[in-house]
Image (tube, grey):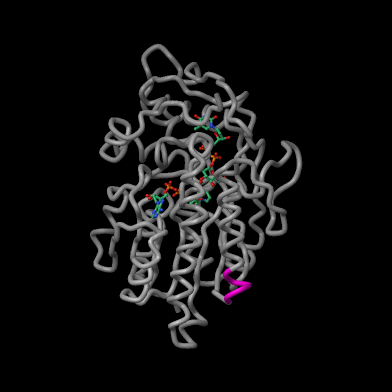
Amino acid sequence: MIRRVLVTGGAGFIGSAVCRLLVARGYHVVCLDKLTYAGNRASLRDAEAEPGFHFVRADIADTETVLELLRNERIEGIMHLAAESHVDRSIDSPAAFVETNVVGTVRLLDAALAHWRTLPARAREHFRFHHVSTDEVFGDLPFDSGVFTEATPYAPSSPYSASKAASDHFVRAWHETYGLPVVLSNCSNNYGPFHFPEKLIPLTILNALEGRPLPVYGRGENVRDWLFVEDHAAALERVLTQGRPGETYLIGGRAEATNLSVVEAICDILDRRQPLPGMVRRSLIGFVADRPGHDRRYAIDPAKAERELGWTPNESFASGLSKTVDWYLANRWWWEPIRASNYAGERLGRVA
Ligand code: NAD
Ligand code: DAU
């Protein structure tokens, strides 16, 4: 049974939800994070109060440091979430995505393999390297047909998704070539508390709250499949502990929505919670130049995860979105410093 887990990227959006969940369930959790612009110790405030939690600032590409940590902490499972995660930034600066998502993952695999090889036979059998990946590796779906399954061929469109596709392939190669017991999960768009406000949902919430323009790329017709982050974290624990080595699991909430409908829903929730004098927030919506290489639609068939792992989400998109808006209203302490000194919401990812 896995009880001692290394979570890479645990100071990020999904990683911090995973750390909170694992600590609450009694795991010994070591969080390794470089603290890039997207990493934030404040997101770990609750986890850090618990004795079973340990934070280490380091780069996944630092194989020596990672190996020492794996040995000293007697790690039984690695959940690898550390990554450059924002598509628009990958359009502006793709090199960082190759460095962390591809090279960093390979260096982490090297450390994991070296550690795994020193374990006794029974511990080797139970060890897992879990790569947390994205549905974006499958590329562009037509608006009116198709869903991603575990059998869908890879066809990434952006530098971000190309780097995640490459890292998926390297993780599988370490399984096929060296026997490292890996599991992979590819998830749809997450949303929820502690989401860095460069992504559509938190950016829209904060801009709408402040009565600022709400930029929607193209005509807002692109479709994403949304999952509340705590439901994803619960799925990830199951993939780690119940997933079969070498297998991939697609995770999603069967909650497709056009970007325009998401932005409108946020406007309507905020109008009910905190009306602006003399205006409805939908009037702040403006169509702006499209994202280059913008995939039209993502949609996940999560039947395998439901069947084999017994996982289903707790939140509908409506209930999760309301909770998320309420969280941002109640937690200015978390996002105000980010907006003031880290990222104020300017447009990213436009090709000149
Ligand atoms: P995030 O950007 O919020 O967090 C990434 C974390 O990784 C940050 O804490 C950052 O400091 C850390 N990090 C970056 N480079 C590092 C390095 N070289 N060494 C150590 N730490 C480093 O990302 P997220 O949205 O929480 O995504 C987490 C993972 O889940 C990513 O691998 C992403 O591809 C995947 N994913 C995300 C979504 C989504 O909707 N957000 C959906 C599916 C899959
Ligand atoms: O599908 C999973 C992926 O979801 C993850 O792998 C990524 O890490 C995560 O960032 C997310 O990628 P997206 O590109 O789908 O997320 P983003 O929030 O950047 O954009 C969601 C949609 O909204 C997308 O179609 C682009 C659009 N958009 C985005 C922004 C920031 C807008 O219309 N306006 C905006 O201002």
Please say whether residue 175 is one of the residues in the magenta stretch.
yes
Query: Magenta-highlighted stretch: main secondary structure?
Result: helix
Vertical side of 335 occupied by 249: above or below: below
Please say whether residue 255 is one of the residues in the magenta stretch.
no
Extreme residue in the bottom direction = 121
Left or right position of 272 against 175? left
What span is colored magenta in the figure? Answer: 174-178
Give coordinates of residue 13: x percent, y percent.
Answer: 41, 48
Quarter of the figure with the N terminus: bottom left
Q: Nearer the viewer, residue 209 or 143?
A: 143
Residue 71's quadrant in the figure?
Answer: bottom left
Q: Nearer the viewer, residue 145 or 307?
A: 145
Give coordinates of residue 137: x percent, y percent.
Answer: 62, 49
Q: Nearer the viewer, residue 256 or 69?
A: 69
Left or right position of 40 against 167? left
Residue shown at 47% from the left, 18% from the top: 284
Quarter of the figure with the C terminus: top right
Q: Nearer the viewer, residue 9 or 100?
A: 100
Vertical side of 313 occupied by 237: above or below: below
Residue shown at 69% from the left, 47% from the top: 155
Left or right position of 16 against 128? left
